[in-house]
Amino acid sequence: ETMAKCYIRYETMQKFAELRECSSLPELMGLISEAEEFKNFHCRNDQKKQLEEINKHDGIRFKISKKAGTGGWTTARKVMCLVQANVAGCPIDNFSLKSEANGICEVALRICAAVYEVSVSMSLFSSAARAKKLHAAIKQQAWEDDSCRVLQQLKGIGEANAKKLLGNNLTINNLSSLTIP
């Protein structure tokens, strides 16, 4: 039922058997990035340098390891990097890479929804909560605790204004409680 509802391939559903109650967010992102739906997003040689730059950005929370013997930029690593870049608002200068990042995030939303449903059906509630948080972050293009990105979603507030508001200790929660005289 979840496969049909979320348009998930059978091979991807089989990977969900690896879900555990204590799956951390990086583990969950790793599992999602290995989904069969991403197999057409190969990492091309001309993208590797850009991916390295994106991976160094401060917004990337879960850095892609480049330890010896771990291989180069695989499709799964590319997916994990681009999802985080999209959520964190990292600049992507390469048009084809930016376009792929948007496509990857659309697919990742469906996969997160499926992970959530499977986690609930398996009574893995902490994994379900993490899947829901990841889904929200991808959809809103902001981590839930990234106040600057959350403020930028308000009409008329760009990066500079968001930083000024944060500099004055005004977060989205503080702004909602303000009254206008």
Image (cartoon, helix red, strand yellow):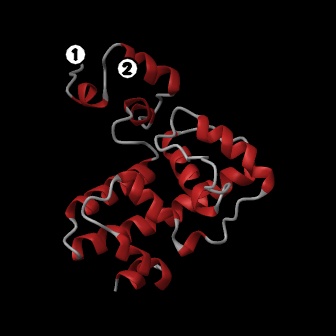
Label 2 – label 1 distance at C-alpha: 22 Å
Asked whether the beta carbons under mark 2 and mark 1 sit within 8 Å of each other, the answer is no
> Does residue 95 lie above or below 15 as drawn?
above
The percent coordinates of residue 13 (x first, y second) are 42, 79
Which corner quadrant holds the C terminus? top left
Specify the farthest residue to the right. 46
Horizontal side of 16 relative to 57 (left or right) equals left
- Give residue 73's quadrant in the image: bottom right
- The three-letter code of the residue at mark 2 reads Leu
> Does residue 58 lie above or below 107 as drawn?
above
- Give residue 56's quadrant in the image: top right
Residue at 37 percent of width and 20 percent of height: 166
For residue 181, the mark is 1
Q: Secondary structure at mark 2?
A: helix
- Name the residue nearer the viewer: 61 or 181: 61
Residue at 23 percent of width and 58 percent of height: 126
Residue at 40 percent of width and 31 percent of height: 151
Horizontal side of 68 relative to 158 (left or right) equals right
The percent coordinates of residue 60 (x first, y second) are 51, 40
Residue 9 in view here: no
Lower sequence index among marks 2 and 1: 2
The percent coordinates of residue 124 (x first, y second) are 22, 67
Count the marks.
2
The residue at which mark 2 appears reads as 166
The percent coordinates of residue 29 (x first, y second) are 44, 57
Q: Secondary structure at mark 1?
A: loop
